[in-house]
């Protein structure tokens, strides 16, 4: 009985999540799911993302829903997880008279702040790619023995923040929370004094909030009230049945006496 009750609660929660996501699809795009924990504990996870686009990026909005405490229960803690993603491409041609090593560095400063301008995360994903090349091959084509074209290099970094106590108030409500994402490219190609190169840096991000909470359960008085109502209904039905049976017996007795 208890297990069935909580399954029903989970189903309602999941449905609410889908409806909420659909309702605000135009303004903000995120998905939510709920995971059952021990006892009445549960975690509601909502995530959103920005696909990589060419840097620099300034104050791009990301939305996540607040925690609806009147519907879900008591919020205990919040985890906010921000992942900064860098994707890039580069090309170089060494014009040196000797063989050398060229380094392509994909990097950037990726930040997330709230609408009040308070910084929440500052990440510096960075990745180095080393290439050995010969002396200048005579053709500037970012290929051959002294040049190279590189696509699809990536770098990423994740940060996490935990909120508890009085910090939780900003997360509780029925609205969406807006965050601002910015990305400044720091990519470069280095290795020799005689080099022709280019580099493109794209940046994107994933943002995930996890609401750890205790489910709302019916008050004991409500459960008692429901139980009392069921018992009362059974008693009334029994009384009706007894009265019917006694009437039938009476009719039979009268019939016998009349005969
Ligand atoms: Ca070349």
Image (cartoon, rainbow, N blue to C red):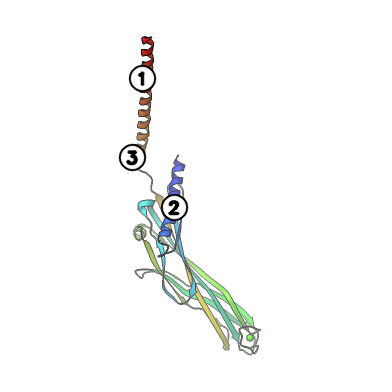
Query: Where is 1 relative to 160, above or below?
Result: above
Q: Tag 2: Cα neighbours inside 10 Å, few (<14), some, or many (≥20)?
A: few
Query: Where is 182 relative to 79, above or below?
Result: below
Q: Position of residue 152 (x, y in %)?
A: 57, 73
Q: Secondary structure at mark 3?
A: helix
Q: Which residue is mark 3?
A: 221
Q: Secondary structure at mark 2?
A: helix
- Residue in the picture at 36% in, 37% down: 226
Query: Where is 225 relative to 121, above or below?
Result: above
Q: Which residue is mark 1?
A: 247
Label drawn at residue 15: 2
Q: Earlier in the sequence, mark 1 or mark 2?
A: 2
Q: Secondary structure at mark 1?
A: helix
Mark 3 CB near ligand 1 (8 Å cut) = no
On the rendered structure, is 4 left or right of 153?
A: left
Q: Is residue 73 visible?
A: no
Q: Position of residue 220 (x, y in %)?
A: 35, 40
């Amino acid at each position: 009985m208890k297990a069935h009750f909580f399954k029903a609660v989970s189903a309602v929660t999941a449905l609410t999540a889908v409806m909420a996501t659909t309702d605000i699809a135009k303004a903000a795009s995120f998905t939510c799911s709920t995971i059952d924990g021990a006892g009445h504990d549960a975690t509601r996870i909502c995530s959103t993302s920005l696909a990589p686009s060419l840097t620099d990026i300034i104050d791009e909005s990301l939305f996540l829903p607040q925690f609806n405490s009147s519907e879900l229960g008591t919020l205990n803690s919040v985890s906010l997880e921000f992942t900064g993603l860098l994707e890039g491409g580069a090309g170089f041609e060494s014009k040196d008279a000797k063989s050398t090593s060229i380094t392509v560095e994909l990097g950037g400063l990726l930040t997330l702040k709230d609408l009040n301008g308070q910084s929440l995360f500052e990440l510096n994903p960075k990745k180095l790619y080393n290439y050995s090349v010969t002396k200048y091959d005579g053709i500037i084509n970012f290929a051959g023995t002294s040049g190279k074209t590189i696509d699809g290099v990536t770098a990423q970094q994740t940060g996490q923040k935990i909120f508890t106590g009085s910090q939780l108030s900003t997360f509780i409500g029925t609205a969406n929370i807006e965050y601002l994402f910015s990305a400044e490219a720091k990519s470069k190609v280095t290795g020799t004094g005689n080099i022709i190169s280019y580099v493109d840096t794209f940046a994107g991000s994933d943002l995930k909030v996890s609401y750890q909470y205790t489910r709302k359960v019916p008050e004991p008085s409500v459960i008692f009230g429901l139980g009392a109502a069921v018992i009362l209904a059974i008693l009334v039905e029994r009384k009706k049945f007894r009265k019917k049976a006694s009437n039938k017996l009476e009719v039979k007795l009268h019939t016998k006496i009349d005969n």
